[in-house]
């Protein structure tokens, strides 16, 4: 078995304008998906990332520089990630195809986690 990260991208303001009911419905969709993958023994963890400004550390001719990352100015942000443990990439792709994130957003990036198979 190998581990894959499902990287959940969305617009910076995607969830800020939802009503409380709409927000709860989105949460229910994600929770149901997690519960199913836990039951199936393939969910290995996940985290929601803060939608507030992050910090970026860069290296250049001026040395190491720390910047506040202006998330609101970006077309999309990494909103969270989920780790699944499946046999191969095609299995991870199938999980992504059925992930509620693609109902509420438009992109999931899948990356194999090195050294985890």
Image (cartoon, helix red, strand yellow):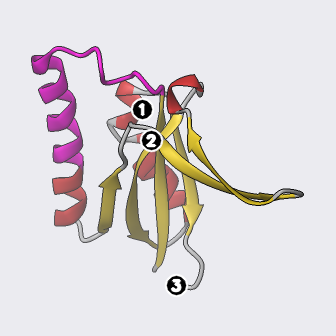
Q: In this orientation, which residue lies closer to the viewer: 71 or 6? A: 71
Classify mark 3: residues with Cα within 10 Å, few (<14), some (14-19) or many (20+). few
Q: Residue at x 55, y 42 (%)?
A: 68
Q: In this orientation, which residue lies closer to the viewer: 43 or 54? A: 54
Q: Which secondary structure dominates the residues rendered in magenta?
A: helix
- The residue identified by callout 3 is 117
What is the number of the mark on residue 97? 2
Classify mark 2: residues with Cα within 10 Å, few (<14), some (14-19) or many (20+). few
Q: In which quarter of the image is residue 35?
A: bottom left
Q: Position of residue 6 (x, y in %)?
A: 46, 54
Q: Which of marks 2 and 3 is nearer the N terminus?
A: 2
Query: Helix or strand or loop: what does disc 2 sit on?
Result: helix
- The residue identified by callout 1 is 102
Q: Residue at x 47, y 72 (%)?
A: 3
As measured in the structure, the alpha-carbon distance from the residue carrying label 2 to the one carrying label 3 is 22 Å
Q: What residue range appears in magenta?
A: 11-33
Q: Earlier in the sequence, mark 1 or mark 2?
A: 2
Query: Helix or strand or loop: what does disc 3 sit on?
Result: loop
Q: Residue at x 84, y 57 (%)?
A: 60
Q: Earlier in the sequence, mark 1 or mark 3?
A: 1
Q: Which residue lies furthest to the front in this view?
A: 62
Classify mark 1: residues with Cα within 10 Å, few (<14), some (14-19) or many (20+). some
Position of the N terminus, as image quadrant, is bottom left
Q: In this orientation, which residue lies closer to the viewer: 3 or 94? A: 3
């Amino acid at each position: 078995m190998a581990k894959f990260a499902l990287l959940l991208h969305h617009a910076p303001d995607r969830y800020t304008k939802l009503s409380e009911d709409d927000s709860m419905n989105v949460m229910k969709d994600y929770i149901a998906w997690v519960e199913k993958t836990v039951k199936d023994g393939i969910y290995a963890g996940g985290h929601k990332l803060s939608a507030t400004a992050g910090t970026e550390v860069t290296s250049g001719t001026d040395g190491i520089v720390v910047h506040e990352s202006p998330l609101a100015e970006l077309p999309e942000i990494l909103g969270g990630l989920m780790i699944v443990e499946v046999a191969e990439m095609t299995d991870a792709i199938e999980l992504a195809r059925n992930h509620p994130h693609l109902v509420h957003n438009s992109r999931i990036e899948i990356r194999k986690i090195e050294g985890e198979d």
